[in-house]
Image (tube, rainbow, N blue to C red):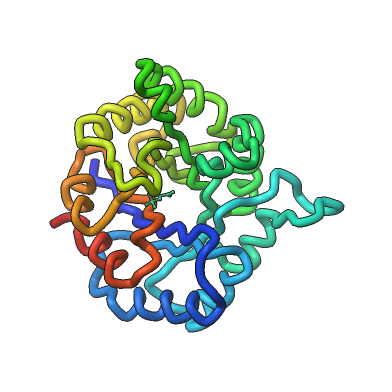
Amino acid sequence: MKRRPLIAGNWKMNGSRKGASVLAQSIHDGLSGARADVALCPPFVYLDAAMEASLPMLAYGAQDVSAHDDGAYTGEISAAMLADMGCKYVIVGHSERRQYHGEVDTLIAAKAGKAIASGVVPIICVGETLAQREAGLTAEVIAAQIAASVPEAATGANIVIAYEPVWAIGTGLTATTAQISEVHAQIRGLLEKRLADGGVLRIIYGGSVKAENAREILALADVDGALVGGASLKAESFLAIINAVGD
Ligand code: PGA
């Protein structure tokens, strides 16, 4: 089955108000009959700037969400607020949040569950560290993360999984196509067993995706798009990745 690819740009903690609006506009202007859904994930405070021109060919996402509905949670942003802002997606469980903010699978599942309840699609990130890969633990780590960070309410259509090997994020190291294929097939197998409509689930790859390697990665059978960090901060490189879909 061919699923419509998703190319999502994770801007992380970069940019400015003006820059967010200019980057969104340039990406939109450069899209010509894209064969993929395209989502921009700016910092929370620049979501509205990136949305300002109401660019019809772009979708938007946030980089995190609260596991709570509302109330006394200083600094948190709820899934309902993201939906209210017009976000279609939210990244949850990114390795930088697992690593620097101590996020664990149960919290990630709770966040993803709140997103689903508000009609926002969580992009649930999983991936092994270099030490885990070198110790031969990749399959085990991925299975545990998938089991515990995908919430009860998940279906093939209301979540996206991002496989992001931690050692490939922001390092310039990309997993080989064989490594990517192996893990994507494993994730699909696990979720096809668990979700009735697992066949429609989009599994995207992230970790140093750039114009030069996008074509071969996006052509892999179980790869349904990309989560792009560094290369999503410039319209030219992000557009080159989008244009590599289906080439
Ligand atoms: P990168 O980041 O493309 O800069 O490696 C990917 C990500 O962290 O989502």
Residue 78: x and y in percent read 70, 55
Residue 135: x and y in percent read 38, 16
Image: 34 above or below 228? below
Which quadrant does the N terminus fall into? top left
Seen from the viewer's position, the closer of residues 175 and 3 is 175
The structure residue drawn at horizontal position 22% and vertical position 52%, both measured from the top left corner, is 214
Which quadrant does the C terminus fall into? bottom left
From this viewpoint, which residue is outermost toward the left? 247
Image: 125 above or below 120? above
Image: 79 above or below 32? above
The image quadrant of residue 233 is bottom left
Residue 88: x and y in percent read 52, 59
Image: 239 above or below 119? below
The image quadrant of residue 107 is top right
Q: Confirm whether residue 35 shows in the render.
A: no
The count of marks equals 0
Residue 105: x and y in percent read 59, 30
The structure residue drawn at horizontal position 37% and vertical position 62%, both measured from the top left corner, is 232
The structure residue drawn at horizontal position 60% and vertical position 37%, both measured from the top left corner, is 108
- In the image, taking residue 213 as reference, residue 70 lies left or right, namely right
Seen from the viewer's position, the closer of residues 16 and 73 is 16
The structure residue drawn at horizontal position 33% and vertical position 72%, both measured from the top left corner, is 235
